[in-house]
Image (spheres, rainbow, N blue to C red):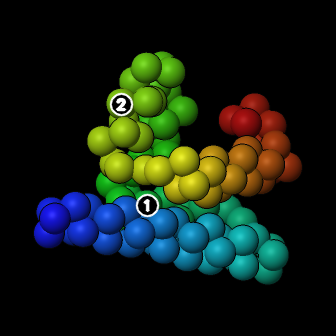
Amino acid sequence: MGQRDLLRDQIEQIGKVLATLLSDFLGLKSKGEALHGIEITNQRLQEQLNIQIEKLVTLTKTELKEYLKTRKLTAERLEILSDYVKEIGIVELETNKRKA
């Protein structure tokens, strides 16, 4: 039972971190600092959750599924992460269409 509670706590913490990161990014984006926000958010994702955004976009569907599964992301957490990746795409379209 203690192990199950620990896992639940870890999953909840991941959700809080993701929500905070997305919120901070959107705040920077609204201030016209989207590229800086992407840089900071990607770094924090790597440091706090061991998620590399640059790696995500290079993985096959199977590899991506395993990569995210090992990070214990629930459907709700995946939705937050996908919202962030979508926002990155929007910023890239506005600033660097070739890279987007």
Q: Is residue 98 visible?
A: yes
Residue 45's disc is 1
Which residue in the structure is indicated by mark 2?
66
- Identified by mark 1, the residue type is Leu
Residue at the far right in the pictured view: 94
Give above or below for 88 relative to 20.
above
Residue 74's disc is none
Question: Which numbered mark, 1 or 2, is in the foreground of this view?
Answer: 2
Give above or below for 82 relative to 24.
above
Give me the residue at 43% from left, 30% from top.
Answer: 65
**Quarter the N terminus occupies:** bottom left
Q: Is residue 86 left or right of residue 4?
A: right
Q: Is residue 14 left or right of residue 20?
A: left
Q: Is residue 56 left or right of residue 5?
A: right
Residue at the far front in the pictured view: 1
Q: Quadrant of residue 27?
A: bottom right
Report the front residue among 1 and 44. Answer: 1
Q: Secondary structure at mark 1?
A: helix
